[in-house]
Structures are given as structure tokens and as C-alpha cells.
Amino acid sequence: MTDSPQKLPHWDLTDIYPGLDSPEFEADFQHAIDLVAGLEAFLVEKQINRDGIHTEQDLPVLSESISALIDWLNQGFSLLYTLNNYTQSLTTVDSYDTLAMQQFSKVQSQLVRLLQVEKVITGWLGSLGSLLDQIIAANPKAESHAYYLKKNAGQSQYLMSDAEEQLANQLSLSGLRAWGKLQGTLTSQLLINFELDGGEKGYPLAALQNIRRYNPHPGIRQRAFQAEIAGLESIRESLAACMNGVSGFNNVLNKSRLRRDAIHHSLDTSSIDQETLEVMLSAMQDAFPDFRAYLHKKAERFNQESLPWWDLFAPVGDNTSQFSWTQAQEFILDNFNTYSPHLANFAKHAFDNSWIDAEPRKGKRGGAFCVRFPAVEQPRVLCNFDGSLDQVSTIAHELGHAYHIYCQRGKNFLQYITPMTLAETASIFCETIIMDAALENASSPQEKLNILETELIGDTQIIVDITSRYLFEKEVYERRAEAELSADEFCEIITRAQVETYGDGLDQDHLHPYMWAWKPHYYRSDFAFYNYPYAFGLLFSTGLYSLYQQRGQEFVPLLQDLLANTGLASPAELAIRFGIDIRSEAFWQQSLDVIRRRIAHYQEL
């Protein structure tokens, strides 16, 4: 039996700030305002803009300015993202917290100002040309931030004028960012009436989705799915407006910044090129028949020809064992320790110090994530624990993100900015540790079947479903350039993408037409196409885990070093240290072969 919901932990944020009304929060917020204002004045004083003409005689002054800017940006971003993530964390677990929402809005306005300053600096860095290399070679502080400086200088070609960038950033508060906030509020506050165990009550969307996914009774799963669809239908017009707002805003910016298409900025943010994405997607598509074979085998276990959506996550095999919160902690810590005591000790610290918010409740967003508080070099983890092995795996996944943050301690903000493609490395690695341990400890074929099922559900989501989300978002951006789309059109695009990827592995009369409505990734203000990086992360981490199995303990410090340096080199540069060529389809196929072996094992049981 799991712990009762009342006993599941809430995270403790008092290490960050005692409260929104605390003197510490007020002082830091005022300090952030002063930092941004001071930096804006510095740009004017030093004439930092893209219009200047510089020669080698200017090198001493330019080098001094770069050192000052590095210090200013590190301090400003560290402080503002701490304030931002603190206020956002409060609203994430309680979307009814109006004070937190108000303070979040105030912090966002200052963060937008700082991001605008960064764009001016980016344009200036681009105008320096070869002088930037000379400065980096002679200035130790610039050299230690070389990756950030060179990457931003390269991105300067995609900037509008300073005035246009400033206007776009200001408008994003009431446009791009506002649409994302509205989507989060609508979906987190949605209560859906559902009858379970003889009583009807209003369930938050995340809680109802847990029933739809994991309840052992197919009739209950089907009813939960139907209730979920009805609930999302009730707010679909508002969510369609949010989707149109986000994609329309981004399309205007991409065109004005001379981006070749909607995904161009995403690739640059992910620090990979089009070639890498295409070879990875090609390898993934080649594996679709293997995933469909898995889905057919699962359908066969339910005496069906193909799976309806509500059976996609359905438990198979012996899943009678449930984890209490204490048992989940012990299982994670014991198995992390077999890989590295360093990792296990970190995870224990996270459990002991209430860094995890686990209870599903009204007003709390669904899903799971890890958030960083830069000023205090601490993370926090959010999940919605239900006692299943899948949720234990999710906690391990998010603790992997937290461990990644821990490995980067001591670095400045600009030195640890990690592309989304590498952000999943530690999380999926930690998840794999847990799932391998669960499989090894299984006491019966039926228990092994259940564990493999849990793994393959995740693999299918990241390879097959992620591709459907990529195809959906790609078409939405292409069509949104011509006109707004209706809720019906969004539903039609997503279901067609599901047919193209899942194929006959799913019952095509029972797909999920509202996946676009509740997934927060589509509504992010800072990252369109937040889908393929998950696939990159799974396959890259799977390749690394295979190396760990070959090399043993000598691999552990190598991975720690990679995690510490994900903000200092590109994925291709870091991968080559392990002999991995991410532009070669062979690497992606080798990682997919690991999953293919799981599917073969699943079919044999």
C-alpha cells in the first residue's frame, strides 16, 4: 500500500526565501531591479551596440567591457532566475496563489529587461568579428566563458534592431508568456467529475490521467479517458486561442529575425544542426515497425487487435506490488549506490531536506520536473506520486536532473547553460539504473513482464509519441503562418500525426485528439519544438549507459565531468570524448538496438 496522500511530502522552499513577504525576497527583488538598471546604464556609457566600428587599438577597452559584462550577466541572471523560479514554483503547486502570480509577473518584467540587454550585448559581440577571438585569447575571464561568447556572437545575425528586440520582449509579457500562463492555469484548475469506488468527485486533470493510465480495470480506464476528453473539450476554445497565440507570436519573430523556418531557432538553442536531427529522426522512423510489434503484442495480451488510447499505459503482468513513499526512497537510494555513492548521497540529501513535492492535489500542475535556484545552487523536484514503479522511475529521472545541477556547482550562470539535448542525459541515465535494478530483482516472469512494460511504455512515448508531437508542431507552425487554426484543426493534425507514427499499433478509432491541449511544452515562451530533445536525450543516454556497462566504475567520473561541462561545449564536442559521432545514423541505431532487445524480451515472456 502507498502512503496516504496527506503523508506525501511537499517541498520546502524556505532555503530559497522565507516567503514572498519576507525582507530577503524584497531585498533581492530590489537588488535585481538595480542590477538591470545599472547594466542598461553601462551599455549607454560604454556605447555597447552593434553600430560601432572597432580596431585592434580598442582591444584593452573592449576586453575590460567584456569582463564587466560577464560579471553583470552572471549576477543578474542568477538572481532573477532564482526569483523567477521561486515565484513560479509557488504557482506550480497552487495556481490559486494570486500573490505568487502577481510577484511572478513582476519578476518576469525584470527578466524580460535583462534578456533584452543580453540581446544588445549579443549584437555587439557579433560586431567585434575577429577581435573577439583576440580578447578571448588574452583575457582569462573571457576565455573561461568562450563558449557562451562565441555562440552568442554567432547568433547576432538573427537579431532585429535593438528597438525592435526591445519591443518584442516587452510585448511577450502580455503576449507569448501570457498565453503560456493561461494554458497552465486552465489545465491545472480544471476539475473533472468522475465516479470511482462508488463515489463521484471532481478530479484534477493530472489525477484523472493517472487513473486513465494505470488503473487495472479496463472499463475504468476507458471511462477516465472519456471524462478526460470531455473535460478538455470544455476548455478547448480557450486552449486553441493559447496555441494560436504562441505559434503566431513565434512565427512573426522568426520571420523578422530571418530564421529559415520555425525549427531553426530550436536547433541553435539545442546546439545541434539539421543533419544531426535528420539522421536521428530517420533512425527513429526505421524503428517504428519494432514499436508497432510491441503494441500488437500488448494488444494481444488484452485480446484485442490493436490498442485504444486508454490501454496505451495499461499495466501488464504482475503489478500488484506498490511502493510506499519510504519504499520508493529506499529502492532509489540502494540502486543509485550501486552506481555511485556520490549520486546516492546527493539523492539522500534531497529526500532528507524536503526537496521533492510529491502529492497530487487541487491547483497543482500535472507531470514532473526539476527546477534550479541558481543563487543558492539548489534544485527542487516536482512529481505526482501514486505508488507505481513508473512513478518511482519518474522520481529517479527528476533526481537525475537535480544531480546534473549538483555536478555543475561552482560554475557561473553563463557557464552552465545546458542545451535541451543534453539536459536529459543524467535524468534518463538515473532512470535506467532504477529500471535495470527492478528487472534484475524481479521474482517471476510476470513481474519481469510488468517492468519491461513500464520501460517500453516510456520508450514508446519518447520515440514514437515524441515524433508525433514533432510532426504536429511542425505542421501547426507552417499552417499558422497563413491563418489561425480552429480547435478542430488542432485535433485533426494531432490525430493524423498519431496515425503516421503509431500506425496500426493503435486503434485508429480511439486516439487522443487533445494531446495538444494539455501538454505544456507547446506553450513554452522560451523553446518551441520541445519534443525531439527528449528523443536525443534517451538515445544519447542509452548509448552512454551501454558504455558504462562495458567499462564499469572507470566510467563514473567521466560522466560526472560531462555533466559538469554541458554549458561549455556542444553535444557533438562532448560526445566525441566517448567516441560517439552524433551525426552518424549508426550511433542512433545502436541505441535503438538496445530498445529492440527489450521488445524481443517482452515478446518472449
Image: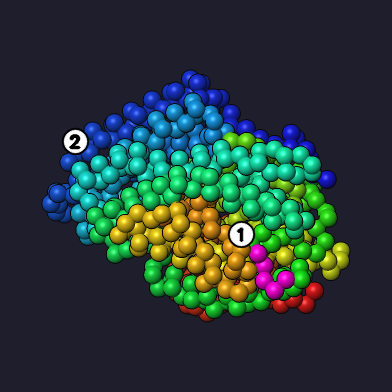
Q: Quadrant of the C terminus?
A: bottom right
Horizontal side of residue 69 vs 100, given as left or right: left
Q: Give the total number of marks visible in the rendering.
A: 2
Residue sitting at 54 percent across and 56 percent down? 515
Residue 86 in the image: state x and y as whole percent. Answer: 51, 34
- Residue 172 horizontal/vertical position (percent): 33, 42
Q: Which residue is mark 2?
A: 45
How far separated are the C-alphas under marks 1 and 2? 47 Å
Foreground disc of the pair 1, 2: 1
- How far from the left and from the top, in percent, is residue 472? 46, 62
- Residue 428: assigned label: 1
User: Image quadrant of residue 147?
Assistant: bottom left
- Viewer can see residue 377: no
Residue nearer the viewer, 93 or 56: 93
* 55 over 308 or under it: above or below: above
Most distant residue in the right direction: 443
Q: Are marks 1 and 2 in contact (CB under 8 Å)?
A: no
Res. 22 visible in picture: yes
What residue is shown at x 58% (from left), y 46% (from top)?
231
Q: SS at mark 2? A: helix
Q: Position of residue 405 (x, y in %)?
A: 54, 48
Q: Residue at x 43, y 73 (%)?
A: 278
Q: Quadrant of residue 207?
A: top right
